[in-house]
Amino acid sequence: PAGIAPAAVVTGAPDVDALLFESCGSPGTLVMVDGAGRLVWYEDLSAVAPGVANVAYAWTEQGTVVAVMGRARLLEVAVDGSILADWDLAAAGLSGLAHHDVARAGGRTYVLYAFEDDALIVDGVAVFDDAGRLVGDLDTRRWFDADQVVPQDFDAYWLGVFPGARSLAHANSLYAHSDGSLLVGFRYLDAVVSVDGDPGSATFGALGWAVEGRDGPGITGARALTSSVTGDVAFEAPHAAALDASGRLLLLDNGLDGAAPSRGLVLSVATPDVAEIVEVLDLPEWCPVQGGVLARDGASTVVTCARVDEVYGFVGDALMWTIDLECVAPDSAPEPMMITRAVPVSW
């Protein structure tokens, strides 16, 4: 159908089976393109949940797609189009509005959400079991001193949603690991935290470690940033914190002012109290919003620049391939959206 498939210009030889993202010309439709930029799969989830668009999506270890539609509905779809789950998150106990990211590991699904408290926009993480029951809930303020944070008067993402409220931390990424740990990233705090994400654990929600960039709020026990490969160890406004197969931390250093292009960063967190930047993935563009850095075993590290709808493949710190996705909306549709993050899929 018109607007679903983006045009693609491929440079190099992408080593991905497919990339998953929301169609930038057809809101509510998830698509996959292969390494040649060809459309190989799509699912119009707006046909199941009319009138609402995706706010978060992920590829699972089970080879399915989970997507949060609107602000409080989760769908799981198989590649044959079967709807495997359809959860009303609000009815299950979600106490705010879902946003940005969803993650799954260990039979649990994690949903990032926001709520208003005393004129502040605050983030939380809700945890659901495999039947869609709310089994855990975390207020992200437990990991930093909110009194040391200056809230943002203007947050374009929440414009009109929480009138008159200021944005505290702007959480923007979740990553769930099979060992029960959970990564949460914060744009306004220039920070990533690793916490116990297992609701059945006696230490559920406890902070394991934290990494702070340029303007971190001074999280207790935050690791010292070091590097032998770059003199610039201070990241800003990061997105999409994740771990690769060897346990290294990946994140997109978006940067705030456009004075320099954005960077993908790979950090070793194996040494207690230290986070060492071991690879810098230099991008040709400034990517101020969204985007991400994701890796698969034995394949390129995939970096998305949402501002220009480009996906880059790195081997080590060398840029090996690019897929430039040109979003085309049908005449009857609004202007194309950006591709927020391309998720590498392995068949």
Image (cartoon, rainbow, N blue to C red):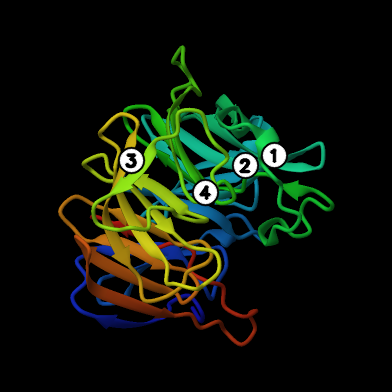
User: Closer to us: mark 3 or mark 2?
Assistant: 3
Q: How far apart are labels 4 and 3 at the CA level?
A: 14 Å
Side of 296 relative to 23 (left or right): left
Q: Which residue is mark 3?
A: 275
Give the label on residue 345, or none.
Answer: none
Tell me the amino acid under the disc marked 1: Gly
C-beta proximity under 8 Å, tags 4 and 3: no
Q: Which residue is mark 4?
A: 190
Image point (56%, 73%), residue name: 337
Q: How far apart are labels 3 and 2 at the CA level?
A: 28 Å
Q: Which residue is mark 2?
A: 113
Instruction: Specify the quadrant that holds the C terminus.
Output: bottom left
Side of 266 relative to 82 (left or right): left
Side of 69 relative to 304 (left or right): right
Q: Which residue is mark 1?
A: 96
User: Which numbered disc, 3 or 2, marks the residue that appears first in the sequence?
Assistant: 2
